[in-house]
Image: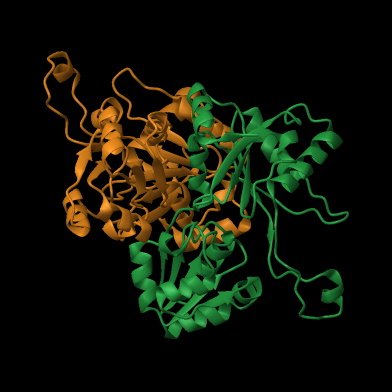
Chain colours: A green, B orange
Amino acid sequence: MLYFIGLGLGDAKDITVKGLEIVKKRDLIFLESYTSILGGCSHQELESFYGKEIIVSDRECVESGAERIIESAGEKNVAFLVVGDPFGATTHQDLFMRAMEKSVKVEVIHNTSIINAIASCGLWLYRFGEIISIPFWDGEWRPTSFFDRIVDNFERGLHTLCLLDIKVKEKSVENIIKNRNIYEPPRFMSVNVAAQQLLDIVQSRDSKDITSQTQCIAAVRVGTPSQRFLTCTLEQMKEVDMGGPLHSLVVIGKMNAVEEESLKCFCETS
Amino acid sequence: MLYFIGLGLGDAKDITVKGLEIVKKRDLIFLESYTSILGGCSHQELESFYGKEIIVSDRECVESGAERIIESAGEKNVAFLVVGDPFGATTHQDLFMRAMEKSVKVEVIHNTSIINAIASCGLWLYRFGEIISIPFWDGEWRPTSFFDRIVDNFERGLHTLCLLDIKVKEKSVENIIKNRNIYEPPRFMSVNVAAQQLLDIVQSRDSKDITSQTQCIAAVRVGTPSQRFLTCTLEQMKEVDMGGPLHSLVVIGKMNAVEEESLKCFCETS
């Protein structure tokens, strides 16, 4: 049996009562560690809260090593823990599907994710369009297709939730070439970097929809005690200081009167 | 102090550990009862799980009677329980804001909602557009503006999550006129009724985008043990038997190859 259990966004106690009961009964516990991080606690704190050992699983373990997880689940009771909701990242739907194909019983324990918790910024969930991800640019590799989707949303008056890249356990090109298992320190995109990349696109395209004056929201450490929301223009967003990860960015479309009022209440201004 | 606590979608144990600890310490507990229902348990079962009395709060209590909740929270520790995530319904953002204006301390304990749990149907959350609500038509009152937004999503290849109307503690026109506090039995829109209303619009507009052959998903009792997902055409959706509430409907946009595979695994077919 393979349980996919969402941990929510903050600390150990954001797991559901049902999720915790299941974890406590499992033989093997994997914690997915590369699509997100739990804002308020380390995996050691999770271990002490559960009274169980946890196997921290990077991309390689989950994607290339999926067979190991699935095989274990054929024989034992396995919990696969995911920050946020288990299906926030599509890679977990894939793992679920592969387990089903091997006739392993599966169950999902949902939890909150940034996708609904973002409503704490004051905007209405019903006024968001397609969610996008902004990847770190790297040298000449400067993809911009996500910008078109922000514009699509914006033209319809919809807000865009931009999830910002995280790089965990990545190798430098040199270490890949030399086949050395030396990893770079983890990197989490800040709203500053996201704003700078967006402004570069605005400038290069001479965009008239999204401009340096477009109003945005920095949504930072959402669901943790140090959560902050700040609204300002894209230009100002380059310079704000919002502290440690995780950061998300909202590009505001057209607000209704209630949302405008809400924003004053739910968000700081720069 | 006023805590907004999400209950998730299934039963009493879908509350988070943090949420449960808070509930157990509160003086007064309100349960919002008109924007959703907890699939797997009654409010009596919640009371017995918490060891606390619950005040079940209808629209009148939460909207017109907000002052009472806020005043209580000025003097006592109050928990306001919401099925799903506290901010899934915009009315709760409003209550939060009004409490803040009265200098009442507020805190939100997030949980899952249909907005992220819908990924259990196999589609990717990143491929959904604007969320819409389909209201019950009533006599000559047959609004259709939600259809334009489905078409907007569809034209961009995006899926649409359609939340279906629920009517709880509503009065008939006769009882409103006679000022009698007699309420109609609760009504929950099924995917059958939603499909019929959509088909009526398709026909009246001679729509070429969304047609009777458009592929949809019935997402039923999501997050509960009796959860079901079924995919079929809009025409077939009129006739499926998916059992009791709550029902949601997904109008599928353009799937990628992985989503097509997923759907075969995650959804029944009719």
Residue drawn at 78 percent across, 71 percent down:
A171
Question: Horizontal and vertical percent for residue B70?
Answer: 30, 33
Answer above or below: position of A115 versus A64: above
- In the rendered structure, the answer to whether residue A58 lies left or right of residue B262 reads right
| In this rendering, position of residue A88 left or right of residue B62 | right
Left/right of residue A70 with respect to residue A212 in the rendered view = left
Q: Residue A100, can we see it?
A: no
In the rendered image, the residue lying farthest to the top is B177
* Identity of the residue drawn at 37% across and 58% down: B18
Picture quadrant where residue A138 is located: bottom right
A66 shown above or below B256: below
Place of residue A32 in the rendered image (x, y in percent of width and height, measured from the top left) = 56, 69
Residue A94: image x %, image y %? 56, 66
Residue toward you, B21 or A183: B21
In this rendered view, identify the residue nearer to me: A144 or B128. A144
Residue in view at x 55 percent, y 61 percent: B261
Please tell me whether residue A204 is drawn above or below residue B268 in the rendered image.
above
Q: Nearest the camera: B139 or B23?
A: B23
Q: Quadrant of the C terminus of chain A?
A: top right
Tell how many labels: 0
Q: Position of residue B83 (x, y in %)?
A: 33, 46
Q: Is residue A200 left or right of residue A214?
A: right
Q: Nearer the viewer, residue B67 or A249?
A: B67
- Can residue A174 be seen here? The reply is yes
Q: Residue at x 60, y 38 (%)?
A: A230
State which quarter of the image contains the N terminus of chain A. bottom left
